Amino acid sequence: MIPQHDIPAQLANLADRKRSKRKLVALTAYDYPSARLLDEAGVDVILVGDSLGMVVLGYEDTTFVTLEEMEHHTRACRRGVSQALLVGDLPFQTYESPEQAVASARRLVKAGAEMVKLEGGSEKAGEVAAIVAEGIPVMGHIGMLPQQVREEGGYKKKGKTSADAERLLEDAAALVQAGVSAMVLESMVAGVSVEITRNVPVPTIGIGAGEGCDGQILVLHDLIGGFPWFRPVLAMQHGDVAGVITRAVNAYAKVVRGE
Ligand code: KIV
């Protein structure tokens, strides 16, 4: 098993950040240069997200991503990260039982992850507890779950009814009980994420869940404009990498063609 960092110190830092209310800055990365740039910029948490299925590998959604692909990209990111907490995302159908979850989590840790993330609430408490019992920290993920996109027929905001909000609060509590060290709250009504953040002792990291979480995460390509064919409404864009590449390629082509 890896540990390149002092994991207990990383976890203590996460807990401190909840206490101190200094917001956690989290982003995804999928390769060495992006991970290193984020690390050097002082990002707190770097997630090798299975969103790489769309923004790097060109799949339609995250359900096509394999554990082998996640290991490959986690290894690349590991080489670029020396400060941030590096989290590896368990892909679709690789944590269907506690035994499978532990085996998959071990592989991501071997590839360099210091924490693994998985999607789901109460129904995944057994898998979370089994991974935690192995000494591997877990980040939960509730709200809109991209790995359920085909089952749900789209990406839908959560917590709109009081029953749904109640279920999200129960899911958050079940994840805490199972031992998560942090949790992502994706695409949910802002009031619900505030309520969860108030109720759980671990940091909440929001995406499309309002400003009341303990931190925020974004898909790097959405932030930097690196995937112009699809921009989720919840994304904040502060760059135009696609434009930079296109302009550089056009300039190069002109030079080569003598135009
Ligand atoms: O895969 C991913 O990038 C994620 C984030 C959106 C939280 O799960």
Image (cartoon, rainbow, N blue to C red):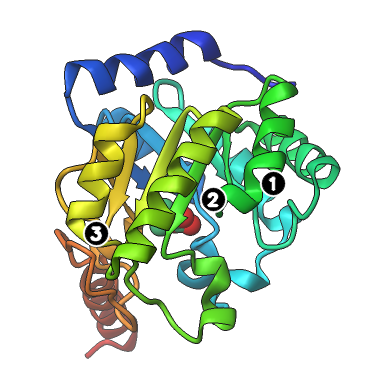
Instruction: Please state the horizontal and vertical placement of residue 153, each as a whole percent of the image.
Output: 50, 86
Q: Is residue 34 visible?
A: no
Q: Which mark is residue 121?
A: 2
Q: Is mark 1 within 8 Å of ligand 1?
A: no
Q: Is residue 71 left or right of residue 167?
A: right
Q: Which mark is residue 71?
A: 1
Asked whether the residues under the numbered discs 1 and 2 touch, taking CB atoms below 8 Å apart as contact, a structural biologist would say no
Residue at figure coordinates x 75%, y 55% from the top left: 94
- Amino acid type of disc 3? Leu
Residue at figure coordinates x 27%, y 70% from the top left: 160
Question: What is the CA distance from the residue labelled 1 to the residue labelled 2?
Answer: 24 Å
- Amino acid type of disc 1? Glu
Foreground tag (2 vs 3): 2
Question: What is the CA distance from the residue labelled 1 to the residue labelled 3?
Answer: 24 Å
Q: Earlier in the sequence, mark 1 or mark 2?
A: 1
Q: Is residue 75 left or right of residue 165?
A: right
- Amino acid type of disc 2? Gly
Q: Earlier in the sequence, mark 2 or mark 3?
A: 2
Residue at figure coordinates x 50%, y 72% from the top left: 54
Question: Looking at the rendering, which quadrant does residue 231 occupy?
Answer: bottom left
Asked whether the residues under the numbered discs 2 and 3 touch, taking CB atoms below 8 Å apart as contact, a structural biologist would say no
